[in-house]
Image (cartoon, rainbow, N blue to C red):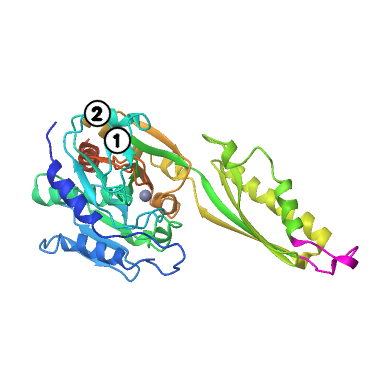
Amino acid sequence: MTIRINANQIIDTFIRYTTINTTSVPENQHLPSCENQYKLAQLVAGEFAAESTVETTINDNAITVLSLPANCTGMPSIVFFAHLDTAPDHTGDTHAIRVQKYDGTDIVLPASGELIAVEAFPELLNYVGQDIITTDGTSLLGADDKAAIAAAVEAIRYMIATPDFKHGDIKLVLLPDEEIGIRGAKALNVAQLNADFGICLDCCGIGEYVIENWYAGSAKMTFKGVTAHPMSAKGKLVNALLIANEVINALPENERPELTEGREGYFWVNKMSGNTVSATLEIALRDFEIDGYQNRKATLQAITEKLQNRYGQENITMELSDIYDNVKAGLDKKPAIIASVQQAMANLGIEPKPLIMRGGYDGSVITPAGLPTVNIFTGAHNFHSTKEFLPAESLRLASEMLLEIVALSADEVAA
Ligand SMILES: [Zn+2]
């Protein structure tokens, strides 16, 4: 196996990106939700400023498209996707640390004194002898998803430097605010990319790739009650909070996040507020099957109608919103995509770990919009945590994966 991506170079690139704090801000409705996402987009675009073959655009939403034209005809056009923001779970600036030749013991994060302990994270032992990137313990690392940006940038750098390496049109698309509702992907003009398929790098450990995720939606309900002085409330007072509670009681009691796993869906009552006169209730709904997802919406609809009949149509409202889809239906239409991910792993000696994802990623919006987009590993562990860590060799192989998938698409054309 030829080594195409240099480990030191990709780690330097990754660490350079971690120095820009791109924590997304859920309360800010502007896209992007923080200015630094532009700054990171500009840094990445700047890396190719001297390359006449690469064209880059950054729009007002910080959606960045970097295009490398095909160097031969008839090959598929592929888009690499990565998101610019990091999760709002921790807002501090990242100080990345490179642990050289990891020795198999607990890793101490120097600024906080926290441990990434082998007992809690036995997967560490898979990386003995390798370099591992961590933080100082005061922030998350942001390998989710800056490792993806580094992997894609280094793969494109390799393609530019290696004219013999055949490829179709290659694009790198950087999207803002994935962590706060996949907002960037929703604002993307997918048809304009004019591509055959996409690859997100937004999974964790080496070998992981997503074969499906769930359908996601949300319901927002409002209830109007009637207040009255308690000494003469009988027959008059209508308690909006108790109507909200009737909804909760009407939901299937075993279908909650804390009681489900694998491919099981749920209703998650995640916000309730109000008083006697008015109350609101928010419920997240998830299901892997489209029928199951539609049934969950119908259940909420039926509960709403029953309450409307009892308390008056005007006093109960419900708004249902679809958030993202299961990618399976879209990926199944082009089985060659998953097949090439698996073949690339086989060629690189990576053990494949197909994943059913209880969540969404940019591809969950991009795939139903017409561009089938798989999700593969960045190599990092413990996303959204101060204990996030990234083995250098896993990141290098994430980048090699992109090149290998492109190379396999050449074989397809030659065959
Ligand atoms: Zn992510």
Residue 1 spot, x, y in % from top left: 14, 31
Task: Name the residue: 38% across, 51% down.
Answer: 371
Numbered disc 2: secondary structure:
loop
Q: Which residue is mark 2?
A: 104
What is the CA distance from the residue labelled 2 to the residue labelled 1? 18 Å
Residue 9 spot, x, y in % from top left: 13, 47
Label of residue 300 in the image: none
Q: Is residue 77 visible?
A: no
**Would residue 131 appear left or right of 321 to someone viewing this image?**
left
Task: Name the residue: 35% across, 66% down.
Answer: 34
**Would residue 193 appear left or right of 46 to someone viewing this image?**
right
Residue 362 spot, x, y in % from top left: 39, 52
Task: Tell which of 98 and 377 is nearer to you.
Answer: 98
Q: Main secondary structure of the magenta part?
A: loop
Task: Name the residue: 48% across, 45% down.
Answer: 326
Numbered disc 1: secondary structure:
loop
Check mark 1 vs ligand 1: CB closer than 8 Å? yes or no.
no
Residue 301 spot, x, y in % from top left: 70, 54
Mark 2: give few (<14), some (14-19) or many (20+) Cα within 10 Å.
some
Residue segment shown in magenta? 225-240
Task: Tell which of 368 and 117 is nearer to you.
Answer: 117
Task: Tell which of 92 and 352 is nearer to you.
Answer: 92
Mark 1: give few (<14), some (14-19) or many (20+) Cα within 10 Å.
many
| Mark toward the viewer: 2 or 1 | 2
**Would residue 397 appear left or right of 201 to someone viewing this image?**
left
Q: Which residue is mark 1?
A: 206
Quadrant assignment, res 314: bottom right
Q: Amino acid at mark 2?
A: Gly
